[in-house]
Image (tube, grey):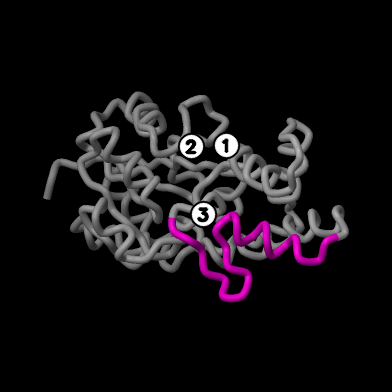
Amino acid sequence: MRDLGAVLFDKDGTLLDFSATWTHVFTHAASVFATRYADPELASQLLRVGGLDPDTGAYTADSVLACGATPEIAKLWAHSLNVAVSEGLVAQLDGWLNALSMRRIAPVVGLNRALGALHEAGFVLGVATMDTVEMAHSDLCMLGVQDYFSFVCGADSGFGYKPGPGMVNAFCDASGLTAERVVMVGDTTHDLNMGRNAGVGLTVGVLTGASDRAALASLADEVIAGAGDLPALLGI
């Protein structure tokens, strides 16, 4: 096994079961738009253009809803609505997506046990998400795993968006480790490409998000069922 010393996790679809956590939230936000524009068909149209099939609940791999930050979702939906993107629209959408009354945090199987094992083995742990850093901290606290992570960054942290290498580079700077010692774990090709663009030592795809094995296989050094299986993969 390579000389690995840190793990950088994506959040949604990697630490959290993506469909269980987000599908009803996206559906709610699209429904609000449909009500505002008095168009009952609009909700389904917005979900589909974003990459979520409202009939099956399936996501298109690497779609905006699966991978994008709120400003990217707002831009896509505004284009579909033929309205201008504004800070107000982004803020409204952010509020609908992040409403505590709508959020149902669903951890992946074996998460706490896996994080505990990695921490005990001396791995430095971090999170890189396309959500805001505030939401990331909130989710980790709700999961009761925040103390395992020494680094958390979001789309608003100033390190750029996935699949650029900025978040990985920032994690390396914070941990004092080179990229070759980092394991990048994620459920989308955006996550894995971010790791590859930064030159990480190992990319690991998980099947608890929006992508299937075929979508991840070309970029992942390993594909596992979920983050709960990572300690076994790393020989812990």
User: Magenta stretch: residue 194 in it?
Assistant: no
Q: Earlier in the sequence, mark 3 or mark 1?
A: 3
Q: Mark 2, residues whose alpha carbon is within 10 Å: few (<14), some, or many (≥20)?
A: many
Q: Quadrant of residue 3?
A: top left
Is residue 85 toward the left or the right of residue 228 in the image? right
Residue drawn 44% across the image and 58% down it: 61
Residue drawn 73% across the image and 57% down it: 30
Question: Label 3 is placed on what type of residue?
Answer: Ala
Marks 2, 3: nearer the viewer: 3
Question: x, y (%) of residue 147?
Answer: 48, 44
Circle 2 sits in a helix, a strand or a loop, which is it? strand
The magenta segment: 39-61
Which residue bears the numbered disc 1? Answer: 133
Magenta segment main secondary structure? loop
Label 2 and label 1: CA atoms lie apart by: 7 Å
| Relative height, residue 174 to residue 44 (above, below) | above
- For the C terminus, give its image quadrant: bottom left
User: Magenta stretch: residue 49 in it?
Assistant: yes
Question: x, y (%) of residue 217?
Answer: 26, 59
Circle 3 sits in a helix, a strand or a loop, which is it? helix
Residue drawn 29% across the image and 33% down it: 198
Question: x, y (%) of residue 46?
Answer: 67, 57
Is residue 231 toward the left or the right of residue 19 in the image? left
Say which mark, if any, is on residue 105: none
Is residue 163 toward the left or the right of residue 198 in the image? right
Which residue bears the numbered disc 2? Answer: 152
Question: Label 2 is placed on what type of residue?
Answer: Val
Q: Quadrant of residue 177?
A: top left
**Marks 2 and 1 close (CB-CB < 8 Å):** yes
Label 3 and label 1: CA atoms lie apart by: 18 Å
Marks 3, 1: nearer the viewer: 3
Say which mark, if any, is on residue 66: 3
